[in-house]
Amino acid sequence: MLPGDGIGPDVVAAAQRVVAAAGAPVAWVPLPVGLRAHADLGTTLPDVTLKGVTECDGALLGPLTTHAYQGPTMPNPSAVLRTRLYLYANIRPVRAWTGVPCRYPELDVVVVRENTQGFYADRNLLDGNGELRPDPDTVISVRLVTRAACARLVRAACELAAERRGHLTLVHKANVLRLGDGLFLEEARRVAAGFPALQVDDLHVDACSMHLLMRPESFDVIATTNMFGDILSDQTAGMTGGLGLAPGLNAGEAFAVAQAVHGSAPDLAAERLGNPVAEILSVALLLRWLSRRGQPGNEGMAAATAAAAQRIEGAVGRALAELGGPRTPDIGGRGDTVAFTEAICRAMA
Ligand code: NAD
């Protein structure tokens, strides 16, 4: 459990509270991260945290105030964990919820975003940063795209689409970024051909953004590169009720980190008004991932984590549907994080 900055400690505590109410067999290991860790231990990502995380089965990471991170003692923990632990797929589902005002109730989509390279300058070189400034008036941004990263990301998206409505949209900008996005598209088509039951199409990212708004019902799973996925998943979150409801999972083969789509929301932190649902649904995604990965010889554990995930998602749905119950202001209520979390716990079947 890595609490993060801003609203992070509150929404992470909310997720832990709901996991306990659901009866999930989780032993939490609190690990220092972010601005608090920097103040106490001199770095935003202490070695004890990196080591401690790998000794766990999975992690819950709160949002971080990364715009304030500068210099070598302030690495972005999110980026380091994603790259070091090969968490190559950032899975970001959104849907409409009964009881929440929503402009696009037909939208039910998962953005599967490449998570380890792309234009994100803090993770696309082995050493140093991918933004270079040869003179004061010039910046060069280096993007990394590898065939292997495209393949593993698209495979994860295909597997997810096969479990959902069987439709995969590859999103890119290969008409301009001919080499980088061209490689993504080439490799994506090759991997997707191994899933003949899927309906696979592709869109330029700018057109995709428009089509999401004009025919939201026609999307199921979107597979895309890092920055496009980051932007599109905020868009899809906004279309269905906002960032307070948008969960995420950073998933690899052997490890996963639950992390909501939203940032540390400094505007809400002091009054403790962060909507906990995104972090709560993120931890449910992690429990589902853990149950699927399984533990040889401990099948009961897999069943218990899957059941807990289902209870959590059901309770969130019931609490949101209960008009008049406590909820946070972003979805029309007057409650704070704690009051809303308690309402979700009460809604546990
Ligand atoms: P943000 O996601 O923190 O906030 C954007 C808007 O959404 C704000 O109006 C905020 O009030 C609202 N919002 C976000 N989470 C909410 C929640 N749980 N409940 C209700 N409303 C919520 O993005 P930002 O303002 O661009 O960035 C703030 C800080 O977070 C920056 O330092 C940024 O670098 C960082 N950030 C971190 C992550 C991460 O750690 N994963 C992701 C994005 C941004």
Image (tube, rainbow, N blue to C red):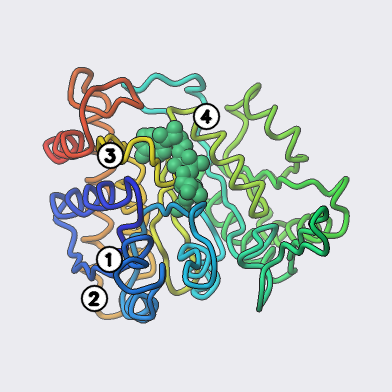
Where residue 298 is drawn, which disc sits there?
2
Give yes or no for contact between labels 2 and 4 (Cβ–Cβ under 8 Å): no
Q: In the rendered structure, which disc, 4 or 3, sits on the residue that comes first in sequence?
A: 4
- Looking at the rendered structure, the kind of residue marked 2 is Asn
User: On the image, which quarter does residue 258 sit in?
Assistant: bottom left
Q: Nearer the viewer, mark 1 or mark 3?
A: 3
Q: CA distance from mark 2 to mark 4?
A: 37 Å
Count residues near mark 1 (Cα–Cα under 10 Å), then give few for <14, some for 14-19, many for 20+.
many
| Residue at 20% in and 65% down | 26
Q: Can residue 94 be seen in this snapshot? A: no
Q: CA distance from mark 1 to mark 3?
A: 38 Å
Secondary element at tag 4: loop
Q: Give percent across and percent down for residue 153.
A: 62, 61
- Looking at the rendered structure, the kind of residue marked 4 is Leu
Asked if residue 149 is positioned above or below residue 66 in the image, the reply reads below
Q: In front: 96, or 35? A: 35
| Residue at 51% in and 24% down | 106
Label 3: which residue?
Answer: 270
Where residue 107 is drawn, which disc sits there?
4
Label 1: which residue?
Answer: 302
Count residues near mark 2 (Cα–Cα under 10 Å), then give few for <14, some for 14-19, many for 20+.
few
Give yes or no for contact between labels 1 and 2 (Cβ–Cβ under 8 Å): yes
